Image: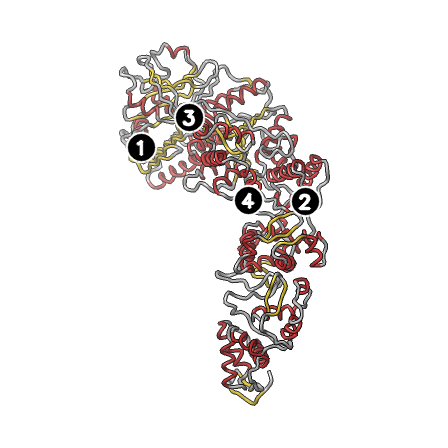
Amino acid sequence: MERLAVQDHQVLVLAAGDTVAARNNAKGHLFENFVALLLHEYGYEAPTTSNLNVHSDGIEIDISATNSITRQKAVVECKAYTSNVRAQACTSFLGKLQLARYEEDDNVFGYFFALPRLVAEGEEVARKAMAKDKLFRYFNVKDVVDLLKNRDLIADTPEGSQAAAANLFSDPAVIITEYGIYSCAKSLDQETHRADSVVVWSTEAKGVPDPVIELLEGDPYATGLTIRTTRSEGTRATPITHEEDTLPTIVRVRGSSEDFEYQLPASPEYFVGRGSAVQDLETFINQHKGSLVLNAQSGWGKSSLALQLKKIVENRGGYAIVVDSRTATSARFISEVLRVAANEAEALDILELPGDCSWASLASSIWTLQRAKWTDQTKPFLVFFDQFENVFQDERMTQEFRDLTLMVRDSEIPTLVGFAWKTDLVAWTESHPFRLRDEIRNSSTFISVGPMRAREIDTLLRRLEKKLGTSLSRDLRQRLREYSQGLPWLFKKLSGHIIRELQARQKSQEQLVSEALNVQSLFDSDLSGLSPVENEAIRHIARFAPVSAIEVTERYNGNAIQSLLDSRLVVALAGKLDTYWDTFRDFLNTGRVPIEDSYIVRQSPRAVAELLYAVLASGGDASVSDLSDELNVSTKVIYNRSREPRLFGLTAYESNRVKLLDEVLHAVDIEAEMRRRVASALRRNRAYSAFLGLAERHGDRVTLSMYSRELTNVFPAVEAQPKSWLEYARSFAMWFHYAGLAIMDNDQLQVPPDGYVPAVTLRGGRAQSRNGESFTLRTPKSAFDLLERLSSNPMTARQYSSLPRHQRRAVTELLTLKLARQLNGDIHIADDVVDSSGKVIAVRILSALQGVPGGTQALNLIREDPQVSNYHLGLAVQNTIGVTWGESTIWKVGKDFRSWAKRAGVPVLRARAFDPSTDEEGPSRLF
């Protein structure tokens, strides 16, 4: 006699069709007829369907029927799912039944079919309802199977099969087709208790028609197994054409063998901190059953926490396995993982499996665990699925895992199931199984993993110093804090780079401090040493990962693939290849790192400007010592000030030198090119994203105090006093203001409007616009004093930097009027500005004034009327520029222009008074 390891039958509705919609439509009508057949047993006529829904989870149908003898009406609802039906479905039907009785007749019958059955809570609701209400009846799959057996539509066992007599069977199922109703079950291997074939049989003498077998071959139930019929001992082999149909391979997640092995998650012995998350894991284990979801972004330590969870379970005398879900390509994957886990746990005397256990499917695996003898239910039994985001690419696989979550939740077995997937998914939209993903998460204990905090980074920094055998400089420690962003993987990647540079390449810590320790540069470094074939191969692997190793080695040279494996840029996963980290894979596919830059700017634009213009004065390249002497500051100050220009892409790193990039040095407009590069760099910084987020929440305006508090979350690994955070916020704000990414007004930041053009220079002055239209002249005294000084000696960049503000403005005026020029950073008087006696040539000034926006118009007014009011002169300049000034500004611009015109030899008289409010002129007056 065959033994059934699983008692509950499955109901398979199989129909042919050219499209999914056509198949679903056919399935719906078949199921409708099947429910009518069941109701016929209770004397009901052909029912009327009011709602029919076929979806990935199963089939739902709402119908009404009338008894052929008593004429009593009945409302019927049937739900055939892949997992047990929730209790809410039953309570909802009871409410619908009561409403029907209100509207029609108190004697309306109610029949609720839940296949395979209601969850435990729902079963209790249904039993209580049947005890109180004699007109209500609940059916599960066992009841349905009994009805079918009573009518001889199905049989318990495959009669007439000699080969089947010695077999162990599981996963019995009822097959509903247009050709009739049939039975099937999975035959198990005697040793492994895996399914080795599907046996299908009929109660009719004619046996099972070929079309039914063909439909069964294409159903997920068969999972590529051989189909056998019992009638003639025939065997119909299902062709295996896809790799996913082979036996699943289980790859265990393994941890690192040292602190800074960034290609692998941290082993428990190298695990650091995460106190609150570990405490949550301890609480989860205390539940003894249920499921857990770990969510975090790439590289935030999900896999390390999974391995730590495994250690906690084992320390309590339990069993745990952490598997890589990237090899999950068929529905048999889960049952195979459970089989391996259960057998290993049995060897540890944690449980004792029944003799007729089955690992043919998820359902039979859960049933096996339910009937296992647990030696001590306080010893945890954990199965954890890591790298789970790969599963979301297959809706059917996701549904299997969802069913696992629900089965574990609704069963009494002391089993813990865990999942870890990253939250920064960007690839899937409509095809992403959001509903199934959310059902897994909503049915589980949920833990969101954040970045490391400052104390945890301190621990890693001490371990890094121990590894190096030397202390890290304060600056290098600070750079590691900022760039690592509190991400354990990124910290290990950066640490590995530092170990290699200090030990193998003999670089100094000062050199490393000056470098940009961002992850993209390190990824670029990973790729820089690859041959063209290796580069092409790794990008192919990243695009299709996890990809068959056979396919890759057939396409690319085997030595190239082995080189990628040896350098640990590629990892092997049971016949498949993938990149060593998902962040690296994203970088290869998109060309960018999905991690924003993370560094704090500490120097103000003006301090950086002083350095850059000194470098510019030296031809774009200067030594640190020369700059130290030129600016009268220490070399440490030069190193500090040179950091921001490198981060912004203005200068290149060269040991003990500051060198402008050629693209900046030879730009048509150096200021504009610097601004563009600064803006581009800051947009990639997490600090800018944080500002935008604050602005969105607080109506576009952000105070520096608000922003400084937000920066503590942006840089979780950096520990500083509130005063320091405020200074960091102010530095960021000034750079945002310069780059045109924000408008800074006192201690407030505002998001600029569309089309906003910043009007401030790196030195802090007002920028000249493209056409020079924002330039206006001021009183000429300072400018002419400066001309007299330049006529004897040029001015060096260092001398310029020490000038008071009003004299710097005079330099700008002379440069704009082309009365002075820059040569190798020094400021010289232009040719033909002074005569041989050193006196300024008036006609040269006049020519310069005519080139100023509004200058020609104002000069014409003076020539026409030497007493023209200063207001009208200022108004002429304003109208030419196209700006709006206040009255006082208009008066002052006119007055200063009159002074310049007088210096240019233009005949002028005392300005006539003018009242703008009445548009009336009066006697001459001085303004």
The Cα–Cα distance between marks 2 and 3, rounded to whole angstroms, is 49 Å
Q: Position of residue 522 (x, y in %)?
A: 58, 41
Dot label at residue 595: 4
Residue 116 lies left or right of residue 208; in this view the side is right
Q: Secondary structure at mark 4?
A: loop
> Considering the image in quadrants, where does the C terminus appear?
bottom right
Q: Secondary structure at mark 3?
A: helix
- Mark nearest the camera among 2 and 4 is 2
The Cα–Cα distance between marks 3 and 1, rounded to whole angstroms, is 26 Å
The Cα–Cα distance between marks 1 and 4, rounded to whole angstroms, is 44 Å
What amino acid is labelled 1 in the image? Arg
Mark 4 Cα shell of 10 Å, populated few (<14), some (14-19), many (≥20): many
Dot label at residue 784: none
Q: Relative to 685, is 579 above or below?
A: above
Q: Earlier in the sequence, mark 1 or mark 4?
A: 1
Dot label at residue 23: 1
Which residue is label 2 attached to?
Answer: 476
The Cα–Cα distance between marks 4 and 3, rounded to whole angstroms, is 34 Å
**Is disc 1 in contact with disc 4, using a CB cutoff of under 8 Å?**
no
Which residue is label 3 attached to?
Answer: 243
**Is disc 2 in contact with disc 3, using a CB cutoff of under 8 Å?**
no
Front residue (pair 561, 409): 561
Front residue (pair 512, 903): 903
Say if residue 331 shows up in the picture.
yes
Say if residue 477 shows up in the picture.
no
Q: Position of residue 833 (x, y in %)?
A: 59, 74
Q: Position of residue 213 (x, y in %)?
A: 32, 22
